[in-house]
Amino acid sequence: MTTTAPEGLLERAERLYRDWRLGAVHEWKARTGGLAVGFMPVYAPREVLHAMGVLPVGLMGAGDDLEIIRGDAYYQSYICHIPRSTMEMALNGSFDCLDGMLFPAICDVIRNLSGIWKMMFAGKVVRYLDVPQDFDPAMGGRFWRKELEGLCDELVAHGAKPLEPEALRRSLGVYNTHRRLVQGLYDLRREQPWKVPTHELYPVLRAGLVIPVEEHVEMLRAYRAAVEADASRRPMDLARVVLTGSFCEQPPLGLIKSLERAGCYVVDDDFVQVHRWIRHDVPTTGDPLDALVNAFLHDSIEHPTRWVEKEPKGADLVERVKRSGAGGVVFCAPSFCDPALLDQPMAVAAVEAAGIPWTAFKYAENTGQFQVIREQAGTFADSIQLWSAVS
Ligand code: SF4
């Protein structure tokens, strides 16, 4: 599978993706003197931070690049890996450049991590973002707006600019552009997956977590232009699959490459969802904070960490499979991930009812052996190709 274009961009993206010491954030702070605030997966109101001159920094663990020594001491053995690597990085000084941390309410592990953070980093902004599970604007909307206003007050107390409506409208516009570009790459990969291999797209998306959104917009544009112009990227006879469950702790890049080498075109996935959490443009007219609140209430993706009101769980996954023309689903979740693994039986029931083949395995962000996964994925890909040939 080719990785020839664009020159230098992919190397930079992978460097940023692996830079758990946050060198790019250090540089940004030295250049601007602004605040930088980290956030855990899966969603953070980045537009608000951006409008206040704060750099939002997405943290998704250390992958397979860091040996965990002290982080393990904070957690029992039967939970996922990302809180351990996050603690390890906090303890080894990697996050010293961050002026605060946001912990979106996605599971008990993140909730506990926010409590540890509050005790250990008392002088910094530390907020558990209790995102609403009631989508009535008069209830959940009011609540979420108040949470955001509380966050703004705390940021101002630590030196950020006060939130101005006009600045927030501009930030909504910048993130709208960014979202369209990310979505455009997902669309292109769905239509021509040989143009946008996931082992390239993934680090490109991860790079956007540690650099200013304006720079990432340029990176996305350059990547799109380069892959579209690269005539050497030709279709291959691979099986199209949707990968689901990897929304928080991320699989190592080697695992993604193994899936592709095993014969899979990943045509949809759950990676770095903060870039796609809100589906469409957020209106830039009217009250901009209300616009962001309403987008969260009514235009967020279906997700295991969100209450699903009407449709049965798994309906959205079936829809994604149909939309992407995939031949099967790979349930690929971190070990011990409650939100992903508690939803999985319902999602499996939904895809089975729709006659969609599936397979499942688990990983940790530092998994180093891919042979078993590669064989399983290869067998699955072959069987999809065979079934589609005879049906
Ligand atoms: S991997 Fe799953 S269980 Fe672990 S922190 Fe993330 S959402 Fe929570």
Image (spheres, helix red, strand yellow):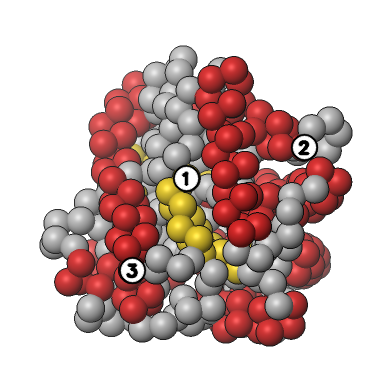
The crowd level at tag 2 (other Cα within 10 Å; few <14, some 14-19, many 20+) is: many
Tell me the SS state at disc 3: helix
Q: Position of residue 200 (x, y in %)?
A: 58, 68
Residue hosting label 1: 129
Rendered position, 154 above or below 216: above
In the image: residue 79, left or right of residue 7:
left
Mark 1 vs mark 3, CA separation in Å = 18 Å
> Residue 129 or 180: which is nearer the viewer?
129
Q: Earlier in the sequence, mark 2 or mark 3?
A: 3
Rendered position, 237 above or below 120: above
Q: Give the residue at the far top of this rendering.
A: 310
Looking at the rendering, which quadrant does residue 207 occupy?
bottom right
In the image: residue 130, left or right of residue 190:
left
Q: Position of residue 122 (x, y in %)?
A: 40, 66
Q: Quadrant of the N terminus?
A: bottom right
Q: Earlier in the sequence, mark 1 or mark 3?
A: 3
In the image: residue 53, left or right of residue 23:
right
The residue positioned 39% from the left and 68% from the top of the image is: 121
Q: Quadrant of the C terminus?
A: top left
Please name the amino acid that badge 3 sits on: Met
Tell me the SS state at disc 1: strand
The crowd level at tag 1 (other Cα within 10 Å; few <14, some 14-19, many 20+) is: many
In the image: residue 195, left or right of residue 143:
right
Rendered position, 170 above or below 301: below
Q: Are marks 1 and 3 in contact (CB under 8 Å)?
A: no
Rendered position, 134 above or below 381: above
Tell me the SS state at disc 2: helix
Residue hosting label 2: 288
Residue hosting label 3: 120
The residue positioned 28% from the left and 82% from the top of the image is: 67
The residue positioned 44% from the left and 32% from the top of the image is: 306
